[in-house]
Amino acid sequence: MTRKWTLGAVSFAALLFLILGQSAILRPQDESPDAPDLSLVQANRQRGRFVQALYQLDVVADQAGWSADRLQLAGDIWRDLGDLTRALPYWEAASLQQPDDRLLRRVLAEAYLTMQRWPDAVDQLTGLIQADANDAWAHFQVGMLRAAFDPQAAEVDLQAAVNVPDYHDLAAALHRIVTEQNTDPLIGMPVGLALADAGYWPQAELAFRHAADVAQAYPEALAYVGLAREQQGKDGSDWIKRAVALGPRSAAVRYVQGLHLRSRNDLDGSLKALLQAVVLDPVNPAYYAELGTAYKLVGDLDNAERWLRVGVETSNQDPRFQRLLALFYAEEVPNLESGLSDLQVLATVMPDDPDVQAGVAWGVYQSGDPDAALAALDAILQADPAHPRSLFYKARILLEAGNLDGAEPLLEQLVGLDSPFQADSQRLLDGLEAAR
């Protein structure tokens, strides 16, 4: 994708005719002074009876017409049902009636971003900026999308977002890239890496695709398109296979291949690919960290510890790699001679890192002191009641102590949180329910 984003209205008339019916769209709106009663619609929506709410709203609209408010409400209810595809035409129709409604434009922009309809998202975001030049959210979102395609335009948007704390780190990183590398045709690669590092995988995929389009035989870009896709639950295998075929001696390609094979549960293949990555690029701490994880997954804890330590050293004691080593010690305390003492040393370096402190508590538990472990976890949870790692460790301690009633609400809380412990928590909760 090498074209620049263009603005322009998109016609949704045909789709709206199918969904709403031609007569409903063309009928004049109710001109009576009394608005139709939507209390039943709202009551059913509040009770989670969304299908009934939609039926009742359709009855009201059949009598009084589809006003902008009713169209937006219908879209909101379809969103409640988790179906943005059906919600969008209603919101779009409402926006046609009320083009200056900024809240509705924001709703549309968020929906287009979620559905990765990038040109439509840019249209809405640009409209938000035109209505309010100080809309930092819109500047940040459109800056991310434009950075790989139009760095000069993105520079302005990112500058407008850089002073907002929620956006500062990524906006500043991208701003540096678009100002320093704005003439590089392959700017999509560093932009994509910055977006991926911040967890914006859909936008990262877009940037990596642009780099792959500009340079047709660019194995690293192909590999990272595949990785970005897999991080979103898509299939990236074909992209990664093409990358390996084009760049078998690229450390980045072998690194991505290692992560890909791990996701396919090919642990031996993943280990071999990551070994190749380290040989090809012996100064990248991320490769050592993933190699350590690969050894841990095949049960070789000595090599796992060794390479995780090398990752810390190579990174100049970067806290991210120290955290990985600390959490390795936390999980493997019973299997390592000096695991708990090494973990406690690392914890003194990161006293404000709740994950590491929770890891210490878990290590203390595995060393035979559940009371001290629970007290440490409770202290963390007092400061952050939704800290996933502390909740998970506490739930496991309570389960192993036979306190099922105490563990159950913690697991239910974790199932509702987007965290690495969500799936394991659901598995434990299912097992707990089956045992009763």
Image (cartoon, rainbow, N blue to C red):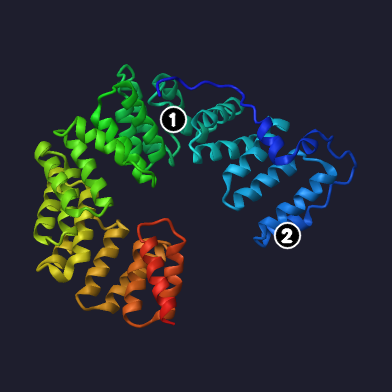
On-image quarter of the C terminus: bottom left
Q: Secondary structure at mark 1?
A: helix
Does residue 107 appear to the left or right of 199 in the view shown?
Answer: right
Mark 1 crowdedness (10 Å alpha carbons): few <14, some 14-19, many ≥20 = many
Q: Residue at x 24, y 51 (%)?
A: 262
For the residue marked with disc 1, what is the amino acid? Leu
Quarter occupied by residue 231: top left
Residue 79 in view in this figure: yes
Q: Horizontal placement of 354 versus 10: left or right?
A: left
Point out the residue furthest to the top here: 183
Q: Residue at x 42, y 56 (%)?
A: 418
In front here: 270 or 350? 270
Vertically, is 131 above or below 39? above
C-alpha span from label 1 to label 2: 39 Å
Count up the numbered dots. Answer: 2
What's under tag 2, amino acid-wise? Ala
Which residue sits furthest right?
32
Q: Which residue is under mark 2?
A: 43
Q: Residue at the spot x=16%, y=36% of the render?
A: 251
Question: Between residues 10 and 268, which one lies in front from this camera angle?
Answer: 268
Residue 58's spot in the image, x, y percent?
76, 48
Residue 278 vs 428, above or below: the answer is above
- Return the mark for residue 230: none
Judging by the rendered image, the residue that carries numbered circle 1 is 145
Q: Quadrant of the N terminus?
A: top left
Task: Report the residue at 22% width, 42% height from top.
Answer: 257
Q: Is residue 316 visible?
A: no
Say which quarter of the image contains residue 382. Answer: bottom left
